[in-house]
Structures are given as C-alpha cells and as structure tokens.
Image (spheres, rainbow, N blue to C red):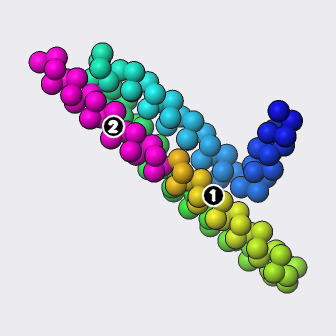
Amino acid sequence: MAELLEAVADLAARGGPALWAIAAVGLWVYAALCLAALDARRAPQRARARLTPTRAGIAAAPLLGLLGTVGGLIDSLEGLMTAGRAEALAAGIGRAMLTTEYGLLVAAPALVLAGLVERAAERAAGELR
C-alpha cells in the first residue's frame, strides 16, 4: 500500500494541478455514468438527464489535459531559460505529455460508455411504451 501511495504522490507531483483536476473530473464522470447506467432500465428519462452534465465533464477532460500541456511547455521553456540544460526541457515536456494522456484516457472511454448508456436508456424507453 505504501508503494501505491508513493506512486500516486509521484504522479501528482509530475502532473501538477491540471492532473488533479483531470482526476477529479474523471471520478465525477465515471460516478455519474455508473448512476446513469443503473437508471437506464428503471428510469430512462432520469438516465438521459444524468448524461447531459456528464457529457460536459467528458468534454472538459481533454481541455484540462491541454491546460496541463500548456503549463508543462511553459515550465520547460522557463527551465531552459534559467538552467540552459536539456534536462529542464525534458521534465516540462514530460509533464505536458502526461496531462494530455490522462485527459484523453478519461474522455475517450467515458464517451463510449455514455453512448452505451444512452442506447440502453432509449431501448428501455421504447419497451416501456
């Protein structure tokens, strides 16, 4: 367990504040998708209503990744200006790529899941009529 906590702390330190925002949005999106999936058969209208704000969160995740990308590139340029070494450049670019990756990792599967939940809710609504 200590190794896991250490790995999470290391990842958070490398990713910066944008990575924390992506993690928060990701948790919220997947929790909302779980609730919508549970509602899909019993209450399809409620499931669809849950999907509207969830899609906003799905759209926000890559944008937060882009924010981290910009922050990482700024850090790398500042590090290059002050230190003048390639290591400073590499660290910032690594942070930039990390936040981009996690933003996409949150959004892409969530978008697919939202489509599946919506389809299930549409089928259930058709069966209820």
**Which residue is denoted by mark 2 in the rendering?**
116
Query: For mark 2, does the 10 Å Cα neighbourhood hold few (<14), some (14 to 19), or many (20 or more) residues?
Result: some
Q: Nearer the viewer, residue 109 or 17?
A: 109
Which region is colored magenta? 107-129
Question: Residue 54 lies in magenta, yes or no?
Answer: no
Which mark sits nearer the N-terminus, 2 or 1?
1
Residue sitting at 46 percent across and 46 percent down? 109
Q: Is residue 30 left or right of residue 72?
A: left
Q: Is residue 46 visible?
A: no
Q: Nearer the viewer, residue 93 or 64?
A: 93
Q: Nearer the viewer, residue 80 or 93?
A: 93
**Circle 2 — which element?**
helix
- Residue 129's place in the image compared with 82, above or below, is above
**Circle 1 — which element?**
helix
**Which residue is denoted by mark 1 in the rendering?**
99
What percent of the width, then of the height, locates residue 23?
A: 62, 43
Give the quadrant of residue 68. Answer: bottom right
Q: How many marks?
A: 2
Query: For mark 1, does the 10 Å Cα neighbourhood hold few (<14), some (14 to 19), or many (20 or more) residues?
Result: many
Residue sitting at 39 percent across and 27 percent down? 36
Q: Nearer the viewer, residue 21 or 104?
A: 104
What percent of the width, then of the height, locates residue 113?
A: 40, 39
Which amino acid type corresponds to the residue marked 1 in the rendered image? Thr
Q: Is residue 99 visible?
A: yes
**Of helix, strand and loop, which mostly describes the magenta segment?**
helix
Outermost residue, left direction? 129
Which amino acid type corresponds to the residue marked 2 in the rendered image? Leu
